[in-house]
Image (cartoon, rainbow, N blue to C red):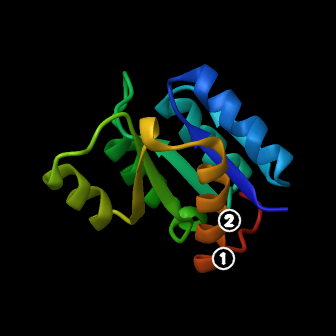
Amino acid sequence: MAKVLIIDDNEPLAKAWAMKLALAGFDVDTAAHGRAGLVKARTNAPDLILLDVLMPGMHGLDLLKWVRDVPWLIKVPVVLLTERYLEQEILDECREWGAIGCLVKEQLTPNDLVAHVQATLKEHPVTNSPAP
């Protein structure tokens, strides 16, 4: 069962997505802010991270840099989540740090999210060993 970590400060939305992904057969965890997300990513070794870009306390790009600094998370696909279109400069920098895509939340249905997660994991399979 593939593990998905959703890091998003919009807790009701993250919980709704987690429920939909769990019903589709994924092992899902959520974190409401960057520090908690980093801890969960390090300890749970997810197969995919859905990362909100604009969060209070720690910007998604900063969190992405921290995630990429962890050896067993380097190849984990990270898909950005945003409430609006990102400025090209921010999007380009996120891609330089390994983000593989960006989804606009208001255009994303729960079924679209499940389909996107399934396609991403098929295209970018990751076999993570448990975190040390």
Instruction: Relative to 114, say whether 100 is above or below.
Output: below
Q: Is residue 132 visible?
A: no
Secondary structure, mark 2, is: helix
Disc 1 crowd, CA 10 A, few/some/many (<14, 14-19, 20+): few
Instruction: Relative to 100, say whether 90 is above or below.
Output: above
* Marks 1 and 2 in Cβ contact (< 8 Å): yes
Cα separation between marks 1 and 2: 6 Å
Identify which amino acid the numbered label 1 is placed on.
Lys
Residue 31's image quarter?
A: top right
42 vs 62, left or right, is: right
User: Which percent across, then down, holds residue 130?
Assistant: 77, 61
Secondary structure, mark 1, is: helix
User: Which percent across, then down, holds residue 13?
Assistant: 59, 27
Identify which amino acid the numbered label 2 is placed on.
Gln
| Residue drawn at x 41%, y 61% as measured from the top left | 101
Looking at the rendered structure, which numbered label has been put on residue 118? 2
| Residue drawn at x 31%, y 64% as measured from the top left | 95
Q: How many marks?
A: 2
Q: Is residue 126 visible?
A: yes
- Image quarter where the C terminus lies is bottom right
| Residue drawn at x 17%, y 46% as measured from the top left | 87
Looking at the rendered structure, which numbered label has been put on residue 122? 1
Along the viewing direction, whichever of 93 and 13 lies nearer the viewer: 13
